[in-house]
Amino acid sequence: MIDFRQLPDDHPDLAYSPMLRAAVLTLQYAQDNGGIGLTQTKAFKRTFVKWAAERFDWPGMSSEELFRYSKVLNEYDFPPLQLLHFLLVELKLGRHYKSEFKLTKLGKELAQHPAQLFNLLIPFYVFDIDHSSYGRFEERPLGDWDVWLNVMNVEIDQGTTERHLYSVFYGSEAGADDIGSRELAVFASFVLKPLVWSGLIFEQAGERDGKKERHYFKTPLWRSVLELDLDEDLPPIQQH
């Protein structure tokens, strides 16, 4: 079982989590406006989707990018919002009442306490959600979060590529140049993307031998909230 430390509400490292930021904004919007309008299919209405796209500051999904090919956005056009909507309802932070999304008593309380919200929302999102259900492929890689996070605690400490991580987890015979694009996509979607969206790691685009590759690094939030094996064996953070 992976443990998360409880941080104070004003801890600066909480700002690294896109999912937490989006959740706080959504809960506060619902509280300030008496709810969020829903379509007949129980999705957020376009007015709120536009508002969210402009304010979530989601990595890799700026409002300019989202509106590049369409003047209007539905909830399904902004996958992080669609996922967040599901999480808020599942965790009973909000509920559908007639044609609106309304906050529950718990939702109103946690809207004012981001650290408590983080410790409820993020472990549930990372560990309990089937990430293959909203990925490109309905597959999941072999392994579990205890193994993935403890190994990554060492391998990603100074930054590494997704290909290197895949080869570490699935055998040296799977050389970095021999990994299939589908296998890599499944691993990235199920393991790496949830950690990026949670704010525990971040990615940078790179290139090797003329091919694009993604590099992954821990954020300060990783070190602040996760209690993992081998923490004491890691080199100290370099101060510049």
Image: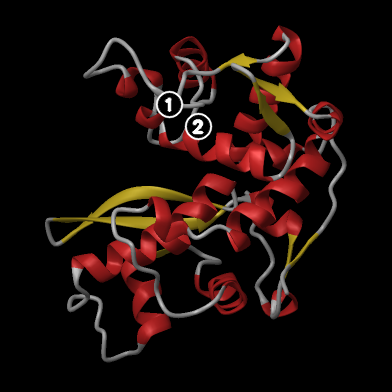
Residue for point 21% across, 19% down: 69
Q: Which residue is mark 2?
A: 81
Quadrant of the frame with the N terminus: bottom right
Point out which mark residue 75 bears: 1
Amino acid type indicated by mark 1:
Glu
Residue at 25% over, 76% down: 176
The residues bearing labels 2 and 1 have C-alpha atoms spaced at a distance of: 7 Å
Tell me the crowding category of disc 1: few under 14, some 14 to 19, or many 20 or more residues within 10 angstroms, Cα based.
many
Secondary structure under tag 1 reads helix
The answer to whether 157 appears left or right of 188 in the picture is right
In this view of the protein, can residue 239 be seen by the observer? no
Residue 34 quadrant:
top right
Q: Badge 2, how many Cα within 10 Å: few under 14, some, many 20+?
A: many
| Residue 174 in the image, given as x and y percentages of width and height | 26, 85
Residue sitting at x 37%, y 84%: 170
**Residue 47 seen:** yes
Q: Position of residue 90 (x, y in %)?
A: 66, 45
Helix, strand, or loop for circle 2? helix
Q: Nearer the viewer, mark 2 or mark 1?
A: 1
User: Which quadrant of the view contains residue 99?
Assistant: top right
On screen, residue 41 versus residue 151, left or right, reads: left
Give the color scheme: rainbow, by chain, secondary structure or one colour: secondary structure
Quick check: marks 2 and 1 in contact, CB under 8 Å?
yes
Vertical arrangement, residue 180 with respect to residue 69, above or below: below
Q: Position of residue 155 (x, y in %)?
A: 50, 74
- As drawn, is 25 to the left or to the right of 119? left
| Residue 219 vertical position relative to residue 79 in the rendered view, above or below | below
Q: Amino acid at mark 2?
A: Leu
Query: Which picture quadrant has residue 173?
Result: bottom left
The x and y percentages for residue 230 are 69, 80
Nearer the N terminus, badge 2 or badge 1? 1
